[in-house]
Image (cartoon, rainbow, N blue to C red):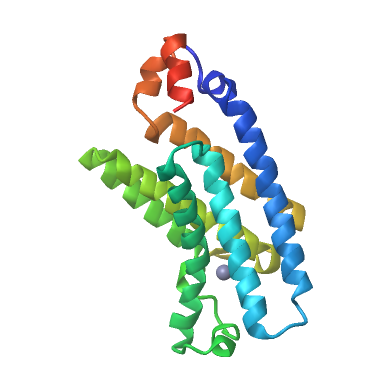
Amino acid sequence: MATLMEVFVTQPSASQTAMWNVIVVFTCCLGDWLCQAVSGRDLLWRALADSGTHGAVGAVSWAVVVLPGRSVAEWTQCLLCGLAASLIDLDHFVQAGSLQLKDAVTLQQRPPFHSTTLVLLVTGVLWVVSLVMHVTQLRKVALLCCVAWLTHHLRDASRRGLWFPPLGSSPPLPYAVYVVSTVAVAVAARCVYVWCVAVPSVHTAVSDPKSLSAVLVQ
Ligand SMILES: [Zn+2]
């Protein structure tokens, strides 16, 4: 029986995965360059650049997972992942109890959706519920939320570290570690997606090379 690695490196998914991984690295670097470029401008511009970068990194990370082709649904999922990655920062406003941008960015404590413990808990609970209720789509939602959330946290972690309440926070991640970790999260999510979410038929397809290629080009 073929291994997951054999599924993963089979064309065309291997070349597409490599391409999207390069796009993830490029997006991380370009987004942060853009944030640097607007660092002297007013708060709204800086917030838009930061939020846009979170969204773009989330969207292309999900593209590593689904390798969007002609399916509108897959591109829509990428947009949703990007949107979710951007919207996580809304908890700054909730924690501040204010809609003012200056209040949202001057918090004394990190807001709740920036807890990486919470990401792992929510993903785990959704995953277990999907298994118990036999709802494959819920596994996809769990994976998408996890990718959106973790890529956001990793980017923030290059400035403030990862936050694991009640244990505490890690030191800020070196920039290269953030970029490599973001790619690693996307590739790991791709493996989980192929094996547990995409189509249960993959499990049967790996023992049948003809149907395997049909599955991989879906
Ligand atoms: Zn954030």
Considering depth in this image, is 2 or 121 the residue closer to the camera? Answer: 2
| Quadrant (top left/top right/bottom left/bottom right) for the C terminus | top left
Q: Is residue 172 visible?
A: no
Total number of numbered labels?
A: 0
Residue 144 shown left or right of residue 153 in the figure = left
* Rendered-image quarter of ligand 1: bottom right
Question: Residue at image x 55%, y 55%?
Answer: 58
Q: Image quarter for residue 200?
A: top left
Question: Residue at image x 58%, y 49%?
Answer: 60
Tell which residue pokes out farthest to the left in this image.
133
In the image, is residue 21 above or below residue 10? below
Image coordinates for residue 184, horizontal then vertical, percent:
62, 43
Considering depth in this image, is 162 or 8 the residue closer to the camera? Answer: 8
In the image, is residue 184 above or below residue 28? above
In the image, is residue 192 above or below residue 39? above
Question: Residue at image x 46%, y 36%?
Answer: 192
Image coordinates for residue 162, horizontal then vertical, percent:
60, 62
Image coordinates for residue 33, horizontal then vertical, percent:
77, 64
Q: Image quarter for residue 199?
A: top left
Image coordinates for residue 97, horizontal then vertical, percent:
44, 88
Question: Residue at image x 56%, y 41%?
Answer: 64
Q: Is residue 14 visible?
A: yes
Q: Image quarter for residue 34?
A: bottom right
Residue 164 shown left or right of residue 134 in the figure = right
In the image, is residue 132 above or below residue 210? below
